[in-house]
Structures are given as C-alpha cells and as structure tokens.
C-alpha cells in the first residue's frame, strides 16, 4: 500500500497544474457551478430565479448567511447598510487628489485598501457593512470627479441601487427621480455578478486573507485581480472591441478571422470561459436583459446589433465550436451599462460592486474554516547549483 505520509515527505513530488485548471483549492458551501450543464447556484438557489425574483441586498444576505432572509431580516440588513452609507471625509480628501488619469479600478482598490487605517479590523460585521455601503459611494466620487461636477450626498431614504444612481447622475440640489427601469436593470446585473466560486479575483481575496491580512486588504487585492482584461476588465474591452468593429465598417468576419489567428495576439473579448463549456447561464440572462432594457429605455445602440452578429458568426465557426467558446457574462453587460449611462471605464467598477458580497462571503468562509495560508509549490527549472563567480571573472 502507498504510504501517503511518506510521499508527502518526499520533496519534489508536487502536482503541476498551471492556472490551477484542475486544482480544488478549498471546500466551499457557497456557490455551485456545473460548467458542462451551464448551472450556477448560490446556496442551492438557481441564478435564474435569484436574478428574476430577488434584490441585490437579498442575494448579498444569502451569500453572507447561507439562507435567504425573512422580511424582517432583510429590513434589518438594509437598514444596517444604510447606517454606513455616509461620506468618509478623510477618504474623500484623499480621493480628490488622485489624478483623473488614474483608472477607476486602481482608485477603487486604493480607497478600499486605505479603509484599513480607518477602522478596527476586529469589527468584522461593521466592516462588512462599511464595504458594501462604501463601494457605490467611491464609484460615484470617481465619476463626479471625472466630469468635474459637485458631489451628491448619499440618500439613505433610497434603496441600494437607486441611491447609487442618484449619487452618479443627479445634479447637486436637483429633485432627481430614479428611473425604475434603470434601477431594476442595475439590480439584475449586480445579482448576476454576485459570486462565482473560485475565480481569479475570489481566489486572490482568499489567498491574501489566508495570510491573515485584513478584509480590506483582501478586497483591495481582489479588485486589482478583477481589473485584468482576461477577467472583469473584459466588459470594458468588449465595448472597445465592438466600437472598433463599428468604426471598421461593421464586418465581424474580419475580427473572427483575426481571433483565430494565434499570431495576431487578438482574442474575441467576452468569449470563452475557464469552466463553462456549453454556455454561461449569466450571459443568457444578460442577452435577453440587454434587448429588454434598450427597448424599455428607447435606446438604439448599433453596437448591440454588431454584438449579435459577432456572436452568430463565432458560433457557426469551427474554431469556436471545437474549443467550446461561447459568450460569457461580460459580452452583453457593457451594452446595458452603456444604455444606463455608465461610462466605459467604469464598467468593471460595476462588476466589483456586484462581486463584493461574494468576495466577502468567501473570505468569511475561509476564516471560519481556519484554512491554512495559501502557498503553492513549483517545479524548479533553473540552473543547477554552481559556485559564485567573482566580479572580475564574469
Ligand atoms: N478568442 C479566441 N480564442 C480563444 C478565446 C477567445 N476569446 N478564448 C480562448 N481561446 C482559445 C485559446 O487560444 C486556446 O486555443 P488552443 O487550444 O488552440 O491553444 C483555447 O481557446 C483554450 O483557451 P485558454 O486560453 O487555454 O482557456 P482558459 O480557460 O485558460 O482561458 C479565458 C479562459 C481567459 C476566459 C479565455 O477564454 C479568454 O481570454 N477570453 C477572452 C477574455 C474574456 O472574455 N474574459 C472574461 C472571462 S469571464 C470573467 O472573468 C468574468
């Protein structure tokens, strides 16, 4: 029989799995994902039902507590978040001197990291609420600064999505009415991004947290991981790509051909997924929502037609079929964000606001389970041992 204990002692025996394609890094009770069948569930509830029936804070409560809230639990949770929906004057001063050339995601990560010095890390419950309340406020600060407009204070009488939209789009002192179509669409988008098991940014949050760095540091790092164009940053990259196709005359076949050419360095952004190999259930919901929202708002965006044509062209191409490359969550989300008035460089911020409850719940689970520090091994392929060469002899 194999003596596992002995095998563990033999240094040099490690699993080589670049990109952790087949490595289960943890046991988790939060999110179930079946990539072959296109199934996504949070604590047992399907993403389709949650996106259709729940509010974003209801899903946040579910992720954080493992159960859907009763009405009174939800009321209390919403009231708790509102309590912390206030302006942090110290961080606002810092935000105002961050140059506008800084990408909104870098600024968001910096502000979240700086929350570290503002609050006692031992106040776990309060810090969770502070983070959920703070991200939309930080996003609105960034937007107002970018357009040179005065800030609109948080409005605690409004629900989470409506307050964010008011801080973003109201002029100071204006009697602003939030369009319910916009607020409903935003609610759905945030839910669709709320958690996605051990993706790159969530794994980053867990890895940073495993060193017992604070929740703020962990989330700040998660935001940076999400920023990359192969992950959450793809939503910005998709719109930029669709715009480029439009500028080039709208011929999608040229771009499909370029994506197939490995020497081009170009990929179809918003296509492909590490785990989903038949369809991304979130992309299906978002595709329908994009059509509905644009129709309801009376927005005609030629880029939507280009996206639909690009999808059809790719899905009938042998290259994409053979590699099981389908539109992912980021393919149509940007079209909705744009219709809601969100600027392109803030799309990934919206993803971060949505993903925050997932990050926090995964961090919480890791801490509760007392998981060990994350520390992968490697296969060393460098030089064998050699004697130091004196400077004069090199
Ligand atoms: N366009 C063209 N070819 C692609 C694409 C694409 N978007 N995605 C993957 N491929 C090809 C690869 O070149 C590779 O081809 P090969 O087998 O001939 O070498 C094959 O499909 C497998 O791709 P990998 O890169 O090995 O797959 P991986 O699981 O490592 O990557 C990823 C997944 C990063 C999502 C990739 O599909 C990609 O870069 N997509 C575009 C960026 C994107 O949309 N990211 C958002 C993902 S969803 C999210 O994070 C929220």
Image (spheres, rainbow, N blue to C red):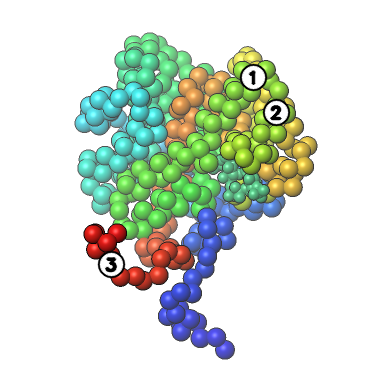
Mark positioned earlier in the residue sequence (2 or 3):
2
In this rendering, would 286 be left or right of 115? right
The N terminus: image quadrant:
bottom right
Compared across the picture, whether 190 is left or right of 221 comes to right
Say if disc 1 is inside 8 Å of ligand 1: no
Residue under the image location 24 percent in, 63 percent down:
390
Beta carbon of the mark 3 residue lies under 8 A of ligand 1: no
From what the image shows, is residue 291 above or below residue 177? below
Q: Which mark is residue 388?
A: 3
Q: Is residue 15 visible?
A: yes
Q: Classify 10 Å Cα crowding around label 2: few (below 14), some (14-19), many (20 and above).
A: few
How far separated are the C-alphas under marks 1 and 2? 10 Å
Residue tagged 1: 248
Sequence-earlier tag: 3 or 1: 1
Mark 1, Cα crowd under 10 Å, few <14 / some 14-19 / many 20+, is few
Other residues around mark 3 within 10 Å, as few (<14) / some (14–19) / many (≥20): few
**Cα distance, mark 2 to mark 3?**
54 Å
Indicate the position of residue 46 as horizontal and vertical percent values.
Answer: 62, 47
Q: Which mark is residue 254?
A: 2
Q: Residue at x 45, y 38 (%)?
A: 227
Which image quarter: residue 299?
Answer: top right
Residue at x 27% of width, y 61% of height = 393
Closer to us: mark 3 or mark 1?
3
- Comparing 241 with 55, the one in front is 241
Q: Secondary structure at mark 3?
A: loop
Ligand 1's quadrant: top right
Quadrant occupied by the C terminus: bottom left
Whether tag 1 and tag 2 are in contact, CB under 8 A, the answer is yes
Disc 3 and disc 1: Cα gap in Å? 57 Å
């Amino acid at each position: 029989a194999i003596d596992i204990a002995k095998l563990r002692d033999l240094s040099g025996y490690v699993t080589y799995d670049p990109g952790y394609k087949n490595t289960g890094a943890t046991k988790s009770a939060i999110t179930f994902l079946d990539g072959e069948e296109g199934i996504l569930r949070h604590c047992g509830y399907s993403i389709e039902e949650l996106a259709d029936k729940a509010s974003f804070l209801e899903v946040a409560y579910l992720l954080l507590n493992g159960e859907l809230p009763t009405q009174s639990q939800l009321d209390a949770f919403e009231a708790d978040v509102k309590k912390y929906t206030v302006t942090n004057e110290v961080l606002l001063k810092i935000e105002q001197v961050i140059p506008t050339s800084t990408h909104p995601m870098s600024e968001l990560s910096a502000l979240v990291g700086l929350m570290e010095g503002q609050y006692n890390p031992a106040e776990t419950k309060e810090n969770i609420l502070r983070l959920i309340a703070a991200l939309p406020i930080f996003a609105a600060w960034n937007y107002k600064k970018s357009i040179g407009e005065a800030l609109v204070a948080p409005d605690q009488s409004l629900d989470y999505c409506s307050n964010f939209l008011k801080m973003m789009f109201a002029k100071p002192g204006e009697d602003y009415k939030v369009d319910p179509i916009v607020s409903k669409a935003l609610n759905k988008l945030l839910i669709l991004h709320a958690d996605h098991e051990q993706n790159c940014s969530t794994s980053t949050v867990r890895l940073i947290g495993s060193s017992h760095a604070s929740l703020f540091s962990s989330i700040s790092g998660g935001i940076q991981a999400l920023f990359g164009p192969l992950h959450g940053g793809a939503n910005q990259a998709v719109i930029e790509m669709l715009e480029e196709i439009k500028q080039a005359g709208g011929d999608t076949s040229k771009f499909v051909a370029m994506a197939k050419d490995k020497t081009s360095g170009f990929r179809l952004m918003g296509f492909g997924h590490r785990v989903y190999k038949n369809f991304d259930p979130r992309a299906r919901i978002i595709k329908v929502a994009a059509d509905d929202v644009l129709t309801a708002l009376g927005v005609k965006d030629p880029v939507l037609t280009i996206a639909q044509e690009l999808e059809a062209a790719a899905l009938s191409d042998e290259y994409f079929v053979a590699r099981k490359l389908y539109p992912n969550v980021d393919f149509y989300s940007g079209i909705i964000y744009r219709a809601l008035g969100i600027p392109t460089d803030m799309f990934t911020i919206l993803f971060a606001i949505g993903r925050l409850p997932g990050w926090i719940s995964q961090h919480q689970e890791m801490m509760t389970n007392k998981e060990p520090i994350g520390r992968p091994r490697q296969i060393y392929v460098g030089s064998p041992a050699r004697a130091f060469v004196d400077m004069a002899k090199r």
